[in-house]
Image (spheres, rainbow, N blue to C red):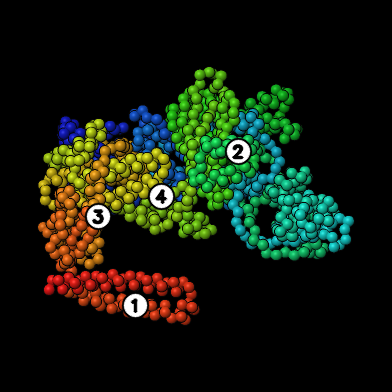
Amino acid sequence: MAFSNPSLSLLSSSCSVCNRLNPLLFSTQRRRRISLSRSHFRSRCFTTVAGMQSSDVFTSPEVAKSFDFTAEERIYKWWESQGYFKPSFERGSEPFVVSMPPPNVTGSLHMGHAMFVTLEDIMVRYHRMKGRPTLWLPGTDHAGIATQLVVERMLAAEGTKRVDLGREEFTKRVWAWKEKYGGTITNQIKRLGASCDWTKERFTLDAQLSRAVVEAFVRLHEKGLIYQGSYVVNWSPNLQTAVSDLEVEYSEEPGTLYHIKYRVAGGSRSDYLTIATTRPETLFGDTAVAVNPEDERYSKYVGKQAIVPMTYGRHVPIISDKYVDKDFGTGVLKISPGHDHNDYLLARKLGLPILNVMNKDGTLNEVAGLYCGLDRFEARKKLWSELEETGLAVKKEPHTLRVPRSQRGGEIIEPLVSKQWFVTMEPLAEKALQAVEKGELTIMPERFEKIYNHWLSNIKDWCISRQLWWGHRIPVWYIVGKDCEEEYIVARSTEEALAKAREKYGRNVEIYQDPDVLDTWFSRIRHAFVRNGIADATGGVRSRMVRAGCGVHCGLSALLVGQMCQQRTLRNSIPLQFLRPDNRAAAAPYEQARHIVLLGGKNGDDGDRIHWDSSIFKCLSSWTYPRFSNPCCANKLIASIICKSCWVLFNICSMGRKMSKTLGNVIDPLDTIKEYGTDALRFTLSLGTPGQDLNLSLERLNSNKGFTNKLWNAGKFVLHNLPPQSDLSAWKAIQGFKPIICSVFSQFDMDDSLYKLPLPECWVVSKLHILIDAVTTSYDKYFFGDVAREIYDFFWGDFADWYIEASKARLYHSGGDSVASVAQAVLLYVFGNILKLLHPFMPFVTEELWQSLPYREEALIVSAWPLTSLPTQAESVKKFENLQSLTRAIRNARAEYSVEPARRISASIVANSEVIHYISKEREVLALLSRLDLQNISFTETPPGDANQSVHLVASEGLEAYLPLADMVDISAEVQRLSKRLAKMQNEYDGLMARLSSPSFVEKAPKDVVRGVQEKAAEAEEKLILTRNRLAFLQSTVLVSN
């Protein structure tokens, strides 16, 4: 049936329709009013669209067999065109702001993106429906290494290099690439349903964010937290830059362990130490040979000198240190401080010199003598060959190596001493440790607290400089002709740097800027704070959303936020509601610790506090920026961070293992969307439990695709069973239940009205109200997996399987329109609220269904969240559960006796008078659900006279049923069938027992085979007993009847 087009006079003048229909769907408490036109109602698509016709966007379940995934993009564009992603202040609630972790501009959508987009969009949509002005700020990261690498490869295909172009021209080429290809990841994120305000999308190299990054560096340097020095870093020879630990991936690869003689100076030919190394080319950088002080094999050599091979007699001391593992290799360690992180730390501790034997491109330098200019791997081969010729090569053997490779370029990373810029981490980490120790920060699950403490107790200073041309240039200028490590100027601009230089060195001074750029992680944190209105040094940035709650993404560099924010114009408090980390799930606990939440601060009048978090942690925090009462306070940093709890998120796995291209188990989210739909993917990803892996299997996706179809079919059922809109009398009958269903919107007491509902309706409404409370609580706690499971169980287990089936007794059977109106009103009410609860998880199918419902005046995305603390009727819930138990018992008996589905059987229900009273009132529901003969159901307090010829069922305490056996089966035929079946089962059982009684089988067969036969025999015995008992019962029934 189709809804007719109502007259405007009816819509405008008749509160008896719009206002008297189900107010939970047609509430006057709406955020947004949409005007109605004569073409408003069309094919049950009840919405008015500005700029887009609803008939071009939405399809009713009445005309579509299933939800069409291709409609998702149309629905998304419609939301965006209506401005639903923008915050609305009409309700005056506290704002909720989330800043998206900016994905790399070079990125392509993967399941990590899909997970964080899903989780953030769930909370954004939830708070939007709660009436809070909600803003999700999108943006993209310039991704220094990745983007430069892409453009350099493009240039290589053209036969040129970046050095040929020069820095300025190369940067122009990168910007051109970004403008052409940079929107790919943004469009893919939109495909996931991200309800961001795209009008506020930013790029981390935008001018405003760039100024904030410079200000951060300047402020941190002024506080002594940034310094320049030469230390061992992870060096990428191909990219010609330092990279962070996060950008180094380790893989186990076959390699070689080389054993080399180091002769002892002044000793005989038999006096030598044998070292085992996987990188013999680094021996030119050796500054000592170390042994364990408890290793008696080498104690006589400690204090003497060793001769480094192939160095024309260069001597190094032989020392002892407990760091050396005497059981590994030969127990002798060559110390090359310039090319090994551990050797570097040991050399610093012992005061050893540091030699660098390698150039930035991976070739050996002049320290290597005759090997100067050779590539490191070529030098290795040549060196070993000459060691063999000189008799200094002992042996080489296969050895599995843990090889560090560049995440971006793939080449082997070289530990290398290089002059870089660093952030001092130890004082910051100390505050973070104290936060957990004092209970200010709670790690959930608790087992991750040890990882947190371990890593922060062993933290290293953070290298923030990169030798790239694409990124935020380090705001440091050097004086021409001066030592750049000693004479430099930190400034916010070239003009400021020149002014400072002239003041110190005179008018004729010349300066040049540091060619390096900042680590992307250092700069991307500013995306969150500048976007949310935190001021910079140039006069401040202020956003309307800054007035209250905000949620922020922070990467590694977020640890600096308390140090880098300067307040000048921010005058209101900002309680941070949610802090979302960047999504890089770590594979091992140690790696997870490397991306932990750091929370700390610095005591003092300025109240400096710092915060950073990781890819695997979610922080629920409360940040407060106190109001300024004194103008002089405006120049002080006053960020105060109180982080209450941190969640360890889940890793996404496939086939039980971490997703990896190498393993071949990567699932592409865009391919998944095409086959299963965005809603099914989002729902599956949301089911993860913090701290545990989520196995993203195709079976789960297929199951949740089925959930989407089930939801669609339920909508089809509800719509097909509503009266035509032109049938005003029918709608007035539905309206008559307004006090029962929706007096909460009118602040009436609903208890009395709820009592008047029939049992199934009272049960399902009560269960819905319980669900709303539970789901809302879980939403507020960010327990999204619990929310998804609770809604799923209610919809499928209670609404679809039970109430929809029970409602058919009202809709299709006797009782008149008044009986049907009860079911119609409740179906509409419950289904509409299910769509609301489920919308944050499955936005597309729920919006499509919502648009098909009558008399709704707005999009589901901006509809009001269901109210909580609605009344429930516990007694009715218990009563209907008894009815369910009775139905299940009858269904099980029918299945056990193989009763044909279409066959109606008789039943005698035995219970006390109270139970009989409410069960008998729902005899039509019982008959429909249990397939009973409605005319042959009796209700009595005593067993029937033919009880000995009936199947006796105990549904629950005080509720029983007797089903006449003759109604269910042909007893004589069933006796014959069971007798034949019993004989066959006995033969199978005897065969199994014969095998088990054979000593040769039990002793010689594999244990798992014997165990399998034993299990089969036990199962066969159990079936034999059940069949014998059933056959005996049937035979006794035949005798009684005769």
Q: Is residue 194 above or below residue 797?
A: above
CA distance for labels 3 and 1: 37 Å
Q: Are marks 2 and 4 in contact (CB under 8 Å)?
A: no
| Callout 1 touching callout 4 (CB < 8 Å) | no
Identify the residue shown where x is 43% and y is 29%. 548
Task: Identify the residue under disc 4.
Answer: 687
The numbered dot on residue 414 is none
- N-terminal of the pair, mark 2 or mark 4, is 2
Alpha carbon separation for disc pair 1 and 2: 70 Å
Q: Which residue is mark 1?
A: 988
Judge the density around disc 4: few (<14), some (14-19), many (≥20) Cα neighbours within 10 Å: some
Q: Secondary structure at mark 1?
A: helix
Q: Earlier in the sequence, mark 1 or mark 4?
A: 4
Q: Would residue 874 be visible to someone looking at this image?
A: yes
Q: Secondary structure at mark 2?
A: helix
Sequence-wise first label, 1 or 2: 2
The kind of secondary structure element at disc 4 is loop
Q: Residue at x 30, y 48 (%)?
A: 794
Horizontal and vertical percent position of residue 489: 68, 30
Type of the residue with mark 4: Leu
Placement of 683 over or under 733, stated as above or below? below
Which residue in the protein does label 2 denote? Answer: 429
Return the x and y of residue 923 as percentages of the image width and height: 15, 53
Amino acid at dot 1: Glu
**Counting residues from the N terminus, which is met first, the one under dot 2 or under dot 3?**
2
Residue 98 in the image, given as x and y percentages of width and height = 45, 37
Furthest-front residue in this view: 942
Tag nearer the camera, 2 or 3? 3
Q: Is residue 194 left or right of residue 604?
A: left
Q: Earlier in the sequence, mark 3 or mark 1?
A: 3
Foreground mark, 3 or 1? Answer: 3
As measured in the structure, the alpha-carbon distance from the residue carrying label 4 to the one carrying label 3 is 34 Å
